[in-house]
Amino acid sequence: MALFIVEIGTIVFVSNLALSPSELSTYENQYNSLAPVLNSSASGQVDAIFANNIKVATIELVPAFGLVLLGLSIYETARVVEVIGVMKGVPVALALANLFILPSTWLELPAYAIAAAESVYLVFGIYLGFKKGLRYLVRELRFLLVSLLLIVGVLIVAAVFEVSEIQIATGSPDGAFYALLTWLPFGAVLAGVIVFWRRARRDAPDIEARDASGGSSQDGEDRGAPQTESEKGGADGPTYSPSRDEGGATP
């Protein structure tokens, strides 16, 4: 959630910074390169958008570098939004409103935040795996699988939403208004994501407890930085957090 909020703040801040002539040219070319995708069929658009987004998310899963790569991708997004405003002769605020008023954005950005957060958890998993035993790394790899399933599922749905928005917006004079109706199915998608995330977080400790050698590992330890032996109280790793179980998925 913290990373998701930072993403939004960074996009708003960077898109209002002055563009150098070289950056303007670079991001104009990047935006113009999207023309073949926009001119393709709906299925082709879904394939292209998902392929690009999953590539970005996969890169952001790289341990230790995920946060840096997230920052770079968000910076590029902000600059492209700014260039779109310049090319269309509209204020940056209107270009930002066009980005955030549609549900596809609220699916893509949380997926990137989850990927970057998982890259941090992987660092702790690798550290504890080398220091205290391979089971700590194996545990985090299981949570990596959960995150991957969630990221892939969300980005597939986000691509479908984005293409639906494009098709509706360009299909009639009032298409921009009708595109807002995509918020209705978005509610169902959000509910499904929350249910999946809560069940995954709820069931994971039970699975770990069954797999533990002594079966005595506690289920309620916080998933975060390595803990001392007195803080652990017999817990088995850095992964599970009660706050995550209560809070559910990001928007």
Image (cartoon, rainbow, N blue to C red):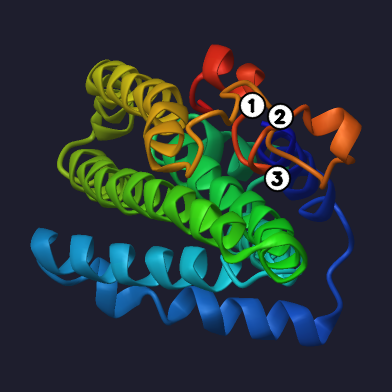
Element at label 3: helix
Element at label 2: loop
Q: Amino acid at mark 2?
A: Asp
Seen in the picture, residue 27 relative to 236 is either above or below; the reply is: below
| Viewer-side label of 3, 2 | 2
Q: Residue at x 60, y 47 (%)?
A: 113
**Which of pointers 3 and 2 lies earlier in the amino acid sequence?**
3
Asked whether the beta carbons under mark 1 and mark 2 sit within 8 Å of each other, the answer is: yes
Identify residue for label 1.
Answer: 241
Horizontal placement of 237 versus 52: left or right? right
Asked whether the beta carbons under mark 1 and mark 3 sit within 8 Å of each other, the answer is: no
Q: Quick one: label 3, few (<14), some, or many (20+) residues within 10 Å?
A: many
Q: Residue at x 49, y 26 (%)?
A: 249
Identify residue for label 3.
Answer: 7
Q: Quick one: label 2, few (<14), some, or many (20+) residues within 10 Å?
A: some
Residue 204 visible here: yes
Seen in the picture, residue 173 relative to 249 is either above or below; the reply is: below
Residue nearest the viewer, comparing 201 with 20: 201
**Which of pointers 1 and 3 lies earlier in the amino acid sequence?**
3
**Which of pointers 1 and 2 lies earlier in the amino acid sequence?**
2
Which x, y percent locates residue 150? 36, 44
- Whole-angstrom CA distance, mark 3 to mark 2, is 24 Å
Which x, y percent locates residue 140? 54, 53
Q: Amino acid at mark 1?
A: Ser
Identify residue for label 2.
Answer: 222
Asked whether the beta carbons under mark 3 and mark 2 sit within 8 Å of each other, the answer is: no
Q: Residue at x 27, y 26 (%)?
A: 189
| Viewer-side label of 1, 3 | 1
Q: Quick one: label 1, few (<14), some, or many (20+) residues within 10 Å?
A: some
Residue 72 visible here: no
Q: Amino acid at mark 3?
A: Glu
Element at label 1: loop
